[in-house]
C-alpha cells in the first residue's frame, strides 16, 4: 500500500470517537447524504445511527472503512449470492473489534456506497493520504 492510499487515521480509528457527546438541544445538522465529502458523510451518518440505536463508533468505523475500500476497489455490489458471500468473508477479515455481523454491517456499507456514488472524485481523494 502506498502512503497516499492509506485511510485517514483521524477518521478511521475505531478507538477514538470523532464526535463529542450528543448535544442536548436540537439544531440543524448535516444529513449524511448532504455531506460534501466522505469524512463528513461518515460523521453525519454516525451521528444519526448513534442517536437512533446507540451504535458506538468502534462498531461503525470499520464498516465505513470497508465501504470506502470496496467502493474504490470496484467490488460488485449486486445482490448476487456468491458476491454477497465474498463480501461477508472479507468483512469478517476486516471488521476488527466491530460487533456488527455482516447483516448489520451490510446496511451501513450499502448506505455508504450510495453516498460514495454521489460524491465528486475530488471529495473522495480527501479521505486517503
Image (cartoon, rainbow, N blue to C red):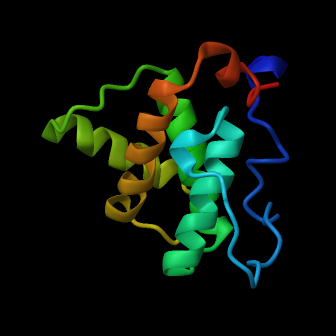
Asked if residue 79 is positioned above or below residue 62 in the image, the reply reads: above
Q: Position of residue 70 (x, y in %)?
A: 48, 31
87 sits left or right of 60 in the view: left
Q: Nearer the viewer, residue 101 or 64?
A: 64
Quarter of the image for residue 17 reads: bottom right
Whether residue 96 is visible, yes or no, is no
Specify the quadrant that holds the C terminus: top right
* Count of numbered labels shown in the rendering: 0
Residue 2 in which image quadrant: top right
**Any part of residue 5 in sight:** yes
Where residue 18 appears, as percent x and y from the top left, is: 80, 60
Q: Does residue 24 appear to the left or right of 79 in the view shown?
A: right
* Residue in the picture at 73% in, 48% down: 12
Depicted 31 relative to depicted 56: above or below:
above
- For the point 79% across and 37% down, the residue is 8
Which is nearer the eye, 116 or 2? 116
Pick the residue in front: 101 or 30.
30
Residue 108 vertical placement versus 100 (above, below): above
Q: Give the residue at the far left of this rendering.
A: 81
Image-quadrant location for residue 13:
bottom right
Query: x%, y% of residue 81?
Result: 14, 41
For the point 53% across and 22% down, the residue is: 72
Q: In this view of the protein, which residue sits in the foreground, 40 or 91?
A: 40
Where the N terminus falls, by quadrant? top right
**Can you name the residue that lies furthest to the bottom here?**
24
Q: Position of residue 124 (x, y in %)?
A: 65, 23
Q: What residue is drawn where x is 75% and y is 85%?
A: 24
Amino acid at each position: 500500500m502506498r502512503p497516499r492510499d492509506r485511510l485517514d487515521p483521524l477518521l478511521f480509528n475505531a478507538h477514538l470517537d470523532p464526535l463529542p457527546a450528543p448535544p442536548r438541544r436540537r439544531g440543524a445538522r448535516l444529513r449524511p447524504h448532504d455531506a460534501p465529502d466522505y469524512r463528513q458523510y461518515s460523521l453525519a451518518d454516525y451521528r444519526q445511527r448513534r442517536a437512533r440505536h446507540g451504535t458506538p463508533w468502534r462498531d461503525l468505523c470499520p464498516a465505513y472503512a470497508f465501504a470506502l475500500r470496496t467502493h474504490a476497489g470496484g467490488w460488485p455490489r449486486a445482490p448476487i449470492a456468491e458476491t454477497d458471500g465474498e463480501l461477508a468473508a472479507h468483512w469478517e477479515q476486516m471488521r476488527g473489534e466491530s460487533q456488527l455481523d455482516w447483516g448489520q454491517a451490510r446496511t451501513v456499507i450499502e448506505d455508504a456506497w450510495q453516498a460514495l456514488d454521489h460524491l465528486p472524485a475530488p471529495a473522495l481523494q480527501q479521505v486517503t493520504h
